[in-house]
Image: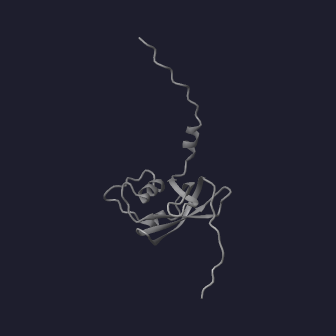
């Protein structure tokens, strides 16, 4: 017989975490073939920790894999002739939007990847800090 060590599920605080993808593996899921993504947190209090995410191997307009691919490849047009090679996503960096939600099957709280966003560049960060004057209401005639 085999041995199993006691472990508990670690729930991380909801937030946005910078990451690098370290691997993507084929996995079998309840509803068919999936990809298992390994995201390594690159800075902050969780730096060095790994977070796992699964997405079906379906690259269609409403799929999780499509949403994640758009976050990882900003500016790339993904259409009918696009072919995703998951090897091209290894070492890609981005921001992981993590939340805490109850499981649909067990009801227990756990982490959920809500979105994968591209890294912000310095120009975008500076643009967000610009204070805009309030709009003036149009004067009546």
Image height check: is 65 above or below 140? below
Nearer to me, 65 or 2 = 2
- In the figure, is residue 84 to the left or right of 96? left
Residue positioned 66% across, 55% down in the render: 44
In which quadrant is the N terminus drawn? Answer: bottom right
Q: Residue furthest bottom?
A: 1
Q: Position of residue 43 (x, y in %)?
A: 65, 57
Query: How many dots with numbers?
Result: 0
Nearer to me, 95 or 98 = 98
Q: Residue furthest top?
A: 141
Nearer to me, 53 or 42 = 53
Q: Position of residue 15 (x, y in %)?
A: 60, 52
Nearer to me, 27 or 133 = 27
Q: Position of residue 106 (x, y in %)?
A: 53, 64
Residue positioned 41% across, 57% down in the render: 66
Image height check: is 121 above or below 28? above
Check the image and tell me how it is coloured. Answer: one colour
Image height check: is 127 above or below 79? above
Q: Position of residue 59 (x, y in %)?
A: 38, 60
Q: Residue furthest left?
A: 80
In which quadrant is the C terminus drawn? Answer: top left
Residue positioned 66% across, 59% down in the render: 46
- In the figure, is residue 79 to the left or right of 34? left
Residue positioned 53% across, 57% down in the render: 113
- In the figure, is residue 27 to the left or right of 18? left
- In the figure, is residue 82 to the left or right of 67? left
């Amino acid at each position: 017989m085999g041995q199993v060590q006691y472990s508990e599920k670690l729930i991380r605080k909801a937030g946005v975490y910078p990451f690098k993808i370290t691997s993507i593996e084929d996995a079998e899921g309840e509803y068919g073939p999936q990809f298992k993504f390994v995201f390594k947190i690159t800075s902050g209090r969780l730096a060095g920790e790994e977070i796992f995410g699964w997405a079906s191997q379906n690259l269609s307009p409403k799929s999780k894999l499509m949403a994640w691919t758009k976050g990882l490849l900003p500016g790339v047009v993904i259409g009918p002739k696009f072919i995703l090679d998951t090897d091209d996503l290894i070492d890609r960096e981005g921001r992981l939007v993590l939340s805490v939600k109850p499981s649909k099957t067990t009801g227990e709280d756990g982490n959920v990847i809500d979105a994968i966003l591209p890294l912000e560049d310095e120009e975008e960060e500076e643009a967000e800090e610009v204070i805009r004057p309030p709009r003036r209401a149009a004067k009546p005639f």
